[in-house]
Amino acid sequence: MLNYIVRRLGYALIMVVLVSFASFVLINLPPSDFLTQKLEQLRARGDRSAEGQIETYRRRYNLDKPFMWQYTNWAVNFVKGDFGESFEYERPVRDMLGERVTMTIILGVATLVVVWILAIPLGVYSATKQYSPGDQIITTISFVGLGMPGFLLALLILYYAITVLNIEATGLFSLEYLDAPWSWARVKDLMNHLWIPAIISAITGTGGLTRIMRGNLLDTLGQPFVEAARARGLTNAVVTWKHAVRIAINPLIVILGSEALPGIIAGTGLVSIVLNLPTIFPMYIDALRKLDMYMAGTCIVIITFLVLVGNLLADIMLAWADPRIRLE
């Protein structure tokens, strides 16, 4: 297991380097950059010193150097913990993304917990009570969840919260805790706001996983080892949860790393824009629009790293859940 984890971490490092290089190339493909746009803005305002200011910026951010020199310098500094400067805000990228990375991870973990707590029991009930009224209701709700875009659901909940409940549904903190240092009061305030985006993201993700769990469990319940367990006199609950679910859950674990986690990051990104959440995705989209290269490149690397870590954890969970799998 240890050798497998070390190999996967090595592959992840190579993937991060390749993704960072590709993203850096794509960000530099447009004919103009942020400083060119800023030069036009300064000229439009009649700033006669605009040319000198822009040249100072270019030397400061090494934009007068060749492309490979720019990337190598950024990559080396990235490893040291210096992610570069944001052209738009003229602040270190590390300072701007510090808490947003934490909020992105917290929101993603909260969504995953809610999705799994709902999807697995609902899928098991739907499979063991096939074609019952409860199964029909769960199937209908699953199809609605599959077809409901997360940002649309966020808009509906936002409208309902403001117009009917008269509460503030945007953000993850109240105004008094927005820039406050971490404390138990701030954590409690975060929990009071976190359930709204977590539930929104979970509703759109639970439907698909419930359907997958139902189908897998129905196939597993017909396997010979399940019939053998029943023949030994085990109760239906023990056969279902101890033997059948442990095998049927394997595809869900695989999906967790390959599809669920990336989908949650992308889905919560749109929800974050609607609900004005302090996560990475809104800042990443804004950096792409404004060609803020160091900010956009850092966001891509962080998102890629989170996805790779999710895949690694999914593989380890898969080996733990199914003893037949040997990662070596």
Image: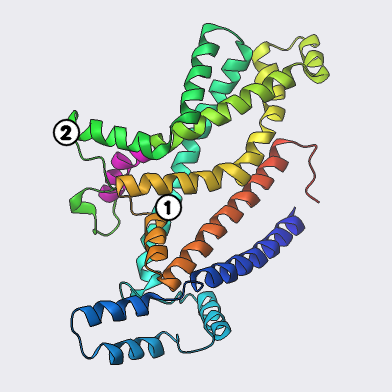
* Nearest to the observer: residue 165 or residue 150: 150
Q: CA distance from mark 2 to mark 1?
A: 27 Å
In this picture, is 159 found above or below 173?
above
Q: Amino acid at mark 1?
A: Thr
Would you say 277 lies left or right of 176 here?
Answer: right
Would you say 24 lies left or right of 289 here?
Answer: right
Quadrant position of residue 229: top right
Q: Where residue 314 appears, x then y in whole percent?
A: 64, 45
Would you say 206 lies left or right of 246 here?
Answer: left
Instruction: Tell me if mark 2 has few (under 14), some (14-19) or many (20+) residues whose alpha carbon lies within 10 angstroms of its own.
Output: few
Q: Circle 1 sits in a helix, a strand or a loop, which is it? A: helix
Q: Which residue is mark 2?
A: 166
Q: Where residue 312 appears, x then y in whole percent?
A: 65, 52
- The label shown at residue 104 is 1
- On the question of residue 103 being in view, the answer is yes
Quadrant position of residue 124: top right
Instruction: Tell me if mark 1 has few (under 14), some (14-19) or many (20+) residues whose alpha carbon lies within 10 angstroms of its own.
Output: many
Whichever of callouts 2 and 1 sits on the residue coming sooner in the sequence is 1
* Nearest to the observer: residue 163 or residue 25: 25
In this picture, is 33 found above or below 253?
below
Which region is colored magenta?
184-197
Residue 112 among those drawn in magenta: no
